[in-house]
Image: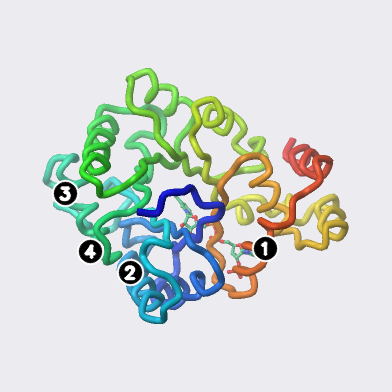
Amino acid sequence: MHSSIPTFLYGTAWKEDRTPALTELAIRAGFRALDTANQRRHYFEEGVGQGLAAAYRAGLVTRDDLFLQTKFTYQRGQDRRLPYDPNAALSVQVAQSMASSLDHLGTDHVESYILHGPSSNYDWTEDDAEVWEAMRRERDAGRTRLLGVSNVSLLHLQQMAASRAEHPAFVQNRCYARLGWDRNVRQFCREHKIVYQGFSLLTANQEVLRHPLIARIATAAKMTPAQIIFSFARAVGMLPLTGTSNGEHMKQDLASHDIPLPTEAIQTVESIAG
Ligand SMILES: NC(=O)c1ccc[n+]([C@@H]2O[C@H](COP(=O)([O-])OP(=O)(O)OC[C@H]3O[C@@H](n4cnc5c(N)ncnc54)[C@H](OP(=O)(O)O)[C@@H]3O)[C@@H](O)[C@H]2O)c1
């Protein structure tokens, strides 16, 4: 089992028929950690598995080189293509969804299993507690190494903690610069040793990407504005995701890891957020 925490996640959402080829291309470019979900509406998880199989066949990597992350998605986040029996108990749905994910990905375990979103936008509910318990059982049975939650507010995390639920290893959230880059949730994560995974770092923050101060920092650092955002994300402790479909961007995104930003530049990016 892959035993470390990755430094970059390649996201496989919205790639439909191109999922197998882009998964293989991402591995060729150097990504070793992949994010998917058993939610056919936005992800083609089986296609990720096909891309992995192609990468193994080509001798690019073995299963042990990879960090695979997938998700359990409630019915309200799905279309009609469900990976479980919607009439079964939630704990059974989790087990069925995980079995289907492992089948799609051609493996007997993943590195990380994420609750795609709580059942309510406001509270950590009893349904969430049941699902989280079922996910813990999957972990204890060796089908995932780590557990996480996604699309959560600070209140969700506080309520989860108050219910004495085990802390997640990961929080995966859309990261808006205008919310201080999800400052409150990131602070909770820091205090509880949870790794914060940030997505939509570029798409949700177009105004930052186009900001003249970012252009200036990018020129000085010989980086692109997108690389500045990823480099900033890492500097403030995030594990970033990218879902690029472009081979050059894949390389640039990965390269941002090797170009640290000066402290002053990090503060500037944070201040643009307000
Ligand atoms: N938990 C959840 O609910 C949730 C929700 C959304 C996403 N996710 C995960 O996060 C992953 C990433 O999603 P995302 O919303 O961050 O991004 P995304 O939708 O995949 O979009 C990234 C955008 O940034 C561009 N881009 C990437 N690198 C670039 C570069 N170096 N220079 C210029 N443009 C660049 C891409 O264009 P090109 O393709 O042209 O490079 C693309 O338009 C998803 O695939 C999924 O795995 C999770």
Q: Amino acid at mark 3?
A: Pro
The residue at which mark 2 appears reads as: 49
Q: Position of residue 151 (x, y in %)?
A: 45, 41
Q: Amino acid at mark 2?
A: Gly
Rounded to the nearest whole Å, what is the CA distance between mark 1 and mark 3? 43 Å
The residue at which mark 3 appears reads as: 86
Closer to the N terminus: mark 1 or mark 4?
4
The residue at which mark 1 appears reads as: 255
Helix, strand or loop under label 3 = loop
Left or right of 181 in this view: 98 = left
Badge 2: few (under 14), some or many (20 or more) residues near its Cα, within 10 Å?
many
Closer to the N terminus: mark 4 or mark 3?
3
Closer to the N terminus: mark 1 or mark 3?
3
Left or right of 58 in this view: 132 = left
Rounded to the nearest whole Å, what is the CA distance between mark 1 and mark 4? 33 Å
Marks 2,4: beta carbons within 8 A:
no
Q: Report the front residue among 212 and 241.
A: 241
Left or right of 6 in this view: 221 = right
Helix, strand or loop under label 1 = helix
Location of the N terminus by quadrant is bottom left
Helix, strand or loop under label 2 = helix
